[in-house]
Image (cartoon, helix red, strand yellow):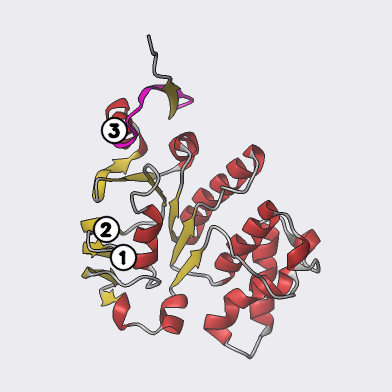
């Protein structure tokens, strides 16, 4: 079973750390959601884990090997990162973009297996009907699904996603969250995603990390973490957490002003 250990991670963009002495371990196939208010370092954390950013101190170990010692290609064979968006895209089709996820495994020699894996990723994300469409003709929601499909095509042991539902409507948000949870369980993959929506997290996450005050303010099963006390501490807002078919549901309480 894959084991990803974050130990003593510290990182900042200026002289002050944004994250300080962050430690946790992921060692089972599940959907882990990272939540917290804007600007606390959620995206920064996952980028440090994937070697996009270099921590000031601490370590990230993938099955005991420090990711800093791994080549980018070697890391990409084990860990995939799905960004929230890409700013510019050269002309290519949806199928070609998804097939790029196979590059860490096959480089320039595309095999029949690579084509099969890419096709499976297209089908899993509901994009098979758009496979020949130019990337630049897609909506933001469709483009987000292409990025997810490209990550799936890497066949990673760890799949990291930065707000993968942010450009999707409610129906497709729920479909993607349900798919990611099932993907983790059925493929034996650790799926770690940054999420802003408390109720999407509450409805689908197996485990929740709340990032706040430079570190992990809460970590555990969804019912243990999605509490009124933790929401007040992290977000500074009142809430009521109720049971909705066995999962927590968060009702935010507006501040009453006199």
The residue lying furthest to the bottom in this view is 109
162 with respect to 148 (left or right): left
Residue ID for mark 2? 25
Image quarter in which the C terminus is found: top left
Return the residue nearer the eye: 134 or 236: 236
Chain-order first, disc 2 or disc 1: 1
Gap between marks 3 and 2 measured at Cα:
21 Å
Residue ID for mark 1? 3
Which label belongs to residue 230?
3
Image height of 75 relative to 203, above or below: below
User: Is label 3 or label 2 in front?
Assistant: 3
> For the point 50% across and 49% down, which residue is it?
181
Q: Secondary structure at mark 2?
A: strand
> For the point 35% across and 27% down, which residue is it?
237
- Image coords of residue 136 (percent x, y): 75, 65
219 with respect to 169 (left or right): left
Answer whether residue 204 is visible to the viewer in this image: yes
Q: Tell me the magenta residue range.
A: 233-246
> For the point 31% across and 59% down, which residue is it?
27
Q: Is residue 234 magenta?
A: yes
Chain-order first, disc 3 or disc 1: 1
Please report contact status of discs 2 and 1: CB closer than 8 Å, yes or no. Answer: yes
Which of the 4 quarters of the picture holds residue 109?
A: bottom right
Which of the 4 quarters of the picture holds residue 22?
A: bottom left
- Image coords of residue 176 (percent x, y): 59, 48
Gap between marks 2 and 1 measured at Cα:
7 Å
């Amino acid at each position: 079973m894959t084991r990803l250990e974050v130990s003593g991670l510290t990182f900042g963009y200026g002289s002050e750390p944004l994250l300080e002495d962050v430690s946790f371990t992921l060692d089972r196939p599940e959907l882990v959601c990272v939540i917290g208010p804007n600007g606390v370092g959620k995206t920064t954390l996952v980028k440090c884990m994937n070697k996009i950013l270099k921590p000031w101190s601490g370590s990230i170990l993938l099955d005991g090997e420090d990711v800093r010692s791994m080549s980018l290609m070697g890391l990409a064979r084990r860990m995939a990162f799905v960004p929230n968006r890409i700013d510019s895209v050269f002309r290519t089709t949806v199928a070609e973009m998804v097939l790029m996820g196979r590059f860490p495994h096959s480089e320039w020699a595309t095999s029949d297996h690579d084509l099969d894996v890419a096709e499976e990723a297209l089908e899993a994300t509901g994009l098979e009907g758009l496979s020949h469409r130019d990337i630049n003709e897609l909506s933001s929601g469709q483009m987000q699904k292409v990025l997810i499909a490209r990550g799936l095509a890497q066949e990673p042991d760890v799949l990291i996603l930065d707000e993968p539902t942010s450009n999707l409507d409610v129906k497709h948000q729920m479909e993607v969250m349900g798919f990611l949870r099932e993907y983790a369980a059925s493929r034996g993959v650790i799926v770690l995603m940054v999420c802003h929506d408390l109720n999407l997290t509450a409805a689908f996450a197996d485990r929740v990390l709340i990032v706040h005050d430079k570190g992990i303010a809460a970590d555990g099963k969804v019912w243990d973490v999605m509490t009124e006390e933790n929401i007040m501490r992290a977000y500074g807002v009142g809430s009521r957490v109720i049971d909705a078919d066995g999962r927590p549901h968060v009702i935010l309480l507006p501040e009453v002003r006199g």
